[in-house]
Image (cartoon, rainbow, N blue to C red):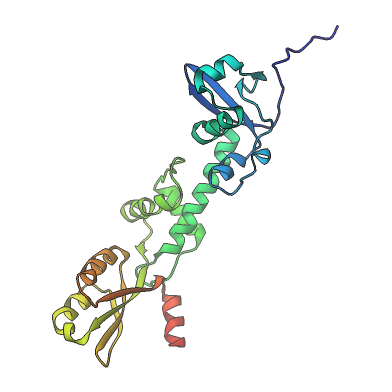
């Protein structure tokens, strides 16, 4: 004898759940895998491609839809579409263990790539391979924070490697160009040269003096503050990252 399923129950599979607690109740929406983050970032704009079904649930896993009275009590006069958007924006994305491991793995790889692009061997000024950097990260026990993006974790990772890794590591230098009126050179040139790792060249053209420098990225703020005080001083980034290979290429083409 078949069992009749209650009318407010809908069974869904292969689903990502976004959950919001409001008014003492739990409300959920059922979404396609990986679509919630795309929608939050603005990559996906069509809600039909995000939601498995345009409905609000109290329990997606059991297929139990929210009652109209509970929705009104928690969200007031908001329409169902508005309620769904609020849940998507402010709710917590429920991630399964395999999904979480996959996302953490991707985030770790992204951080490793960014670290690889931003560091060099101090002795040779040459970049390390991705594999070497990943091994060093594992050796020092670098832990990925899933709540932060890759870019915001790169500096912390580099500092950890510098402090605890056996791998000699240094942030790759930046190449910048300093421009000053010749009238200010006598007063400022010593400061400009002092903060540089390498002064590649300097020249005077008419009433303008220019110098191309390699600096530690940590010095960039100091240079910017120095030149911001000068009416006609200027600081331009030529290369965000300078390695021995890049420097040799630059010299060959210069």
Q: Nearer the viewer, residue 254 or 116?
A: 254
Residue 172 lies in quadrant: bottom left
**Quadrant assignment, res 180:** bottom left
Asked whether, in this view, residue 120 is left or right of residue 73, the answer is left
Q: Relative to residue 107, is residue 51 drawn left or right? A: right
Residue sitting nearer the eye, 55 or 2? 55
Q: Position of residue 55 (x, y in %)?
A: 65, 26
User: Can you give x and y, in whole percent of width and height, for residue 193 in the image?
Assistant: 22, 78
- Which of 141 and 146 lies nearest the eye of the viewer? 146
Q: Is residue 159 left or right of residue 48?
A: left
Q: Quadrant of the N terminus?
A: top right
Q: Is 187 located above or below residue 81 in the figure?
A: below
The residue depicted at 41 percent of the width and 75 percent of the height is 244
Question: In the rendered image of this protein, does residue 44 appear above or below residue 64?
Answer: below
Q: Which residue is at a point 44% across and 67% down the rendered structure image? A: 127
Q: Residue at x 47, y 18 (%)?
A: 23
Judging depth in this view, the residue of 177 and 52 nearest the camera is 52
Image location of residue 140, percent across then percent down: 39, 48
The answer to whether one can see residue 96 in this image is: no
Q: Position of residue 162 (x, y in %)?
A: 33, 56
Question: Most extreme residue toward the top, as rendered?
Answer: 1
């Amino acid at each position: 004898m078949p069992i009749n399923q209650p009318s407010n129950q809908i069974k869904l599979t292969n689903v990502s759940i976004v959950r919001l607690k409001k008014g003492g109740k739990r409300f959920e929406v059922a979404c396609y895998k990986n679509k919630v983050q795309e929608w939050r970032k603005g990559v996906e704009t069509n809600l039909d491609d995000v939601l498995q079904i345009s409905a609000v649930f109290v329990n997606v896993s059991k297929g139990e839809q929210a009652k109209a009275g509970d929705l009104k009590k928690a969200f007031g006069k908001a329409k169902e579409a508005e309620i769904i958007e609020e849940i998507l924006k402010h709710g917590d994305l429920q991630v399964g263990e395999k999904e979480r491991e996959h996302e953490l793995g991707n985030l770790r790889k992204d951080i490793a790539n960014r670290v690889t692009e931003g560091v060099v061997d101090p002795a040779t000024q040459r970049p390390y391979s991705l594999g070497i950097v990943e091994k060093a990260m594992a050796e020092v026990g670098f832990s990925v924070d899933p709540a932060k993006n890759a870019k915001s974790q790169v500096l912390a990772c580099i500092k950890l490697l510098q402090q605890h890794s056996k791998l000699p590591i240094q942030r790759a230098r930046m190449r910048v160009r300093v421009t000053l009126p010749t009238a200010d050179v006598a007063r400022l040139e010593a400061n400009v040269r002092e903060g540089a790792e390498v002064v590649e060249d300097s020249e005077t053209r008419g009433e303008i003096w220019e110098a191309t420098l390699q600096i530690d990225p940590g010095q960039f703020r100091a240079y910017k503050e120095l030149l911001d005080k000068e009416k006609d001083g200027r600081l331009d980034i030529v290369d965000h990252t300078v390695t021995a290979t890049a420097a040799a290429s630059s010299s060959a083409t210069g």
